[in-house]
Each structure stands twice: as structure tokens, then as C-alpha cells.
Amino acid sequence: MSTHAQGRDPLPVAVIGCGRMGRLHARCYGQMPQVTLVGVHDASASAAQETARQFNTTAFASAGPLLDRAKAVSIAVPTEHHLTVAEPFLKRGIACLIEKPLARDEQESRRIVELARDGGAVVQVGHIERFNPAVRALEKMQLRPRFIEVARISPMTFRSIDVGVVLDMMIHDLDIVLKLAGSKVARVEAAGVSVIGGVEDICNARLTFENGCVANVTASRLAMRTERRLRVFASDAYVSIDYQKKEGIVVRRAGNLEAVRQAVAQIRSGQLRDLAQVNFQDMVRVEKLPTDDVEPIRAELEAFVAAATGQSAPAVTAEEGLAAVSLAGRIVAAIPQDSSV
């Protein structure tokens, strides 16, 4: 098993993959007193050596030696290598935090789930948006969404040009939508466009859940600005979140609904004829979503270490990672053929 007894020596951890995310993991581990960063590895020896130098650890020429040194690893390599890199660690029961998406398709994701189960290894999937302070505050409200709207658009970064925008960007929101809806997806409708060539660069998906919830999710990596917003409409509240600013607002049904109904009744009865006197935004009371200032990557790794040491269940399980990848596949399959421009 991968659990490490609470209260003993720091948990030995390692990072495989020293790109942007891997370096973030290494930095954060270096700031956590409950762990010791025992090593890093990357296909680029220079990247591994620079990361090791920067965070005061050892660079390894291969991942093999870390099997005997680490009790938990962050796997931040390109998605197509997730299964290959994770397999020996999972077979040894070593806890793995695997960056999102869990794998490049449903088949490989299922294999990771099986390996973790057979090896008794803890797996947490790196859906970091789950740890956005605004998202964590939203989850605490325990709403039952009726309609969810998400927009995640940005200019091209050229980091993930070999995968489509669904697995590259929308996967964040699919994970959150699945968590919020709390139901199976009954129907998937999608439209997408390939501009650069080969894979979709823009996609809109309409998801209908078995419990009646509907989600409209849009992702684009060809926008001229960056926008990442989540809006949740529930029977008792409306919540709007700005992922970038890590903040949100709440408009509750209680109190606000009666004020709007009174205005509508006055208009219908003729008591209120001058519509310039009516301002919807002035009628409703808007609250600020209460959030903390914990860095998402720190919250994510704290949760992973807690799971690896047996203190809690993984915050984002392998099964949840599989569900997001499976849904992504259904969306891509639903995009009409010949959607290039």
C-alpha cells in the first residue's frame, strides 16, 4: 500500500516531468514540511538538472530509481505518456498524482484505474480547477443545479497542439460539471471547428443529465482574450464564478424573488407605467462568494499528500478522471464530420 503513517518522517515524494506543471509541483513540495522531495526526472536531462538545482533535490536519468525512493509521485509528463510512466509505480502501490487528463483516451484511463486497484495505489487526478478557491466555496453551498453555463476561451498557447481543445481545455470544466450535476449524462450534442488542422480548436457541447440538469460548455483556444467563467443556476440561487480572479457572486432566491414578482405585478396591473423606474440589478441583493486565498496548487498537493498518507480519500479519484475523459470522448465523437474551416 502507498499510505505512509501520519506523524512519522516526512513523506518521500518525487516529480516526473519538469515542464511548467512539474516545476510548480516541485516548488510546492519544497515548501511543505510534511514531505521530502527526493528527486525529479525528465526526458530532457537539462530540464531535470535545472529543476533539481532550483529546488534542492536530485535529478535522475530515468524514473526507475525513484521506485525505491519515493512513496508518492507527481506525474506531469505529456498525456500520451501517462499510462506508461504511471504503470510501474501503480504496480508497486506507490501513490500517484497524475496530471489532467488522466490519459489520452478512455481505454488507457480504464487501464490506470485497474492498475491502481490491483496494486492498492492511491491515485489523484490533477484537475486543479477543483481547488480554485471560488470552486471550493461553490461546492460548500451544495446546490442542485438546473442549468450550468461554462466558457473557457483564450489565445493559442502552442503548448498542446497535438490534442484538441476538448482534452486540452474543456476537460477542466467537464470534471467540475460532472461533480456539480451529480448525475449521469443522458445526451450529448456538440459542434466544433478545426482551424489549425487535425483536431478541434473550438467546441461547444450541450449536455443533458438524467436528473434534468443541462450544461452548456464552450471552449476555444483561438480567442483574442482570455475568459474563464462558470455560471450555475439552481432552484434557490444563482452563482457566477470568475476562474481567473478566483472570485464569484451569489444571488439567492430568498428575498430577491419577491421583489421581482412585486415589480412584475405592478407593471401588469398598470400601477407602474414608467419602466425607467425599474432596474433589475437594483432589486436583487448580490453577495460576494466567500473564498480563501489558498493557492490552488498548494491545496491540490496538500490533498494528495493527505490521501497518500491515509488521512483522507483522494480529492479527485481515478474513477472521476476516467469519467471526464470518457465524456470528452463522447463530445468529440458528437462533433459533425468535416468541421474544418
Image (cartoon, helix red, strand yellow):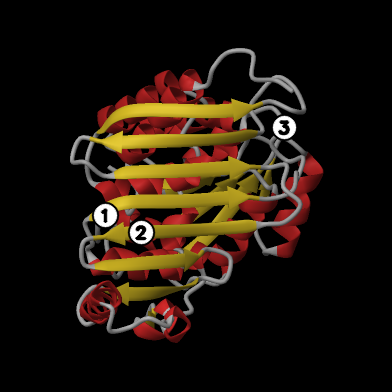
Question: Which quarter of the figure has residue 93?
Answer: top left
Task: Give the residue type that dot 1 points to.
Answer: Pro
Question: Which quarter of the figure has residue 133?
Answer: bottom left
In the figure, is residue 255 to the left or right of 293?
left
What kind of element bears circle 2?
strand
In the figure, is residue 31 to the left or right of 320?
right
Q: Which label's residue is closer to the chain start, 2 or 3?
A: 3
The structure residue drawn at horizontal position 27% and vertical position 68%, both measured from the top left corner, is 237
What kind of element bears circle 3?
loop
Q: Does residue 315 lie above or below 78 as drawn?
A: below
Task: State which quarter of the image contains the N terminus.
Answer: top left
* Foreground tag (1 vs 3): 1
Query: Tag on residue 145?
Result: 1
Residue 118 rendering spot, x and y as whole percentages: 26, 27
Q: Does residue 231 lie above or below 277 as drawn?
A: above
Q: What distance separates the C-alpha of mark 1 from that of mark 3?
A: 33 Å
- Other-residue count near label 3 (Cα within 10 Å), few / some / many at <14 / 14–19 / ≥20: some
Task: Give the residue type that dot 2 points to.
Answer: Val
The structure residue drawn at horizontal position 47% and vertical position 56%, both measured from the top left corner, is 129
Task: Give the residue type that dot 3 points to.
Answer: Ile
Reading the image, the residue beneath label 2 is 232
Q: What distance separates the C-alpha of mark 2 from that of mark 1?
A: 6 Å
Q: Are marks 2 and 3 in contact (CB under 8 Å)?
A: no
Q: Which label's residue is closer to the chain start, 2 or 1?
A: 1
Q: Which label's residue is closer to the chain start, 1 or 3?
A: 1
Residue in the foreground of this view, choosing between 189 and 50 = 189
Residue 211 rendering spot, x and y as whole percentages: 18, 41
